[in-house]
Amino acid sequence: MAHALDAATGAAEGDAMTATPGPWMVWEGRNGELRAGPSPNCTVASLSKPPVGDVAFNARLIAAAPELLEALVDIHDYAHNCSTGPAVPDHFWEIRARCARAIDAARSKT
């Protein structure tokens, strides 16, 4: 199953749900929390210090989400295009399936 996504919005082709366009950045909010989004006027996520984990790493990971999704769609499409014909390596099927599951999870409306 191919996933045609708009690289700018992350929206599936024909899908009304859209993501906030990237690129996103990370900045510190007024209360010391880290925020991620396209600009300080548009916060997509706000992270305070969790009991475990690296809040700065988590913020950077969230900020990279639009580019990561775009790259994942490219990998999926490449694996899809390479997984036709008589001698397809098994790992192409696995890569394609893993990408499709992750893309579906990112696009999920629940």
Image (cartoon, rainbow, N blue to C red):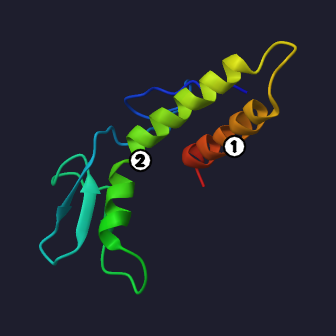
Does residue 73 appear in the picture of this structure?
Answer: yes
Which quadrant of the figure has residue 9? top left
Q: Position of residue 56 (x, y in %)?
A: 29, 67
Q: Nearest the camera: 95 or 103?
A: 95
Q: Residue furthest bottom?
A: 51
Q: Position of residue 91 (x, y in %)?
A: 76, 35
Q: Is residue 94 left or right of residue 29?
A: right
Instruction: Check residue 72 in the rendering and tell me which mark sits there, or answer none.
Output: none
Q: For this rendering, which residue is in front, 64 or 9?
A: 64
Q: Is residue 15 visible?
A: no
In this orientation, which residue lies closer to the viewer: 58 or 89?
89
x 81%, y 22%: residue: 88
Asked if residue 19 is positioned above or below residue 11 in the image, the reply reads below
Q: Amino acid at mark 2?
A: Ala
Please state the horizontal and vertical placement of residue 106, each as a whole percent of the image: 55, 47
User: Is 27 rendered above or below residue 24?
Assistant: below
> What secondary structure is marked by label 1?
helix
The residue labelled by disc 2 is 65
Q: Which residue carries the number 1 mark?
A: 98
Marks 1 and 2, the one that precedes in the sequence = 2
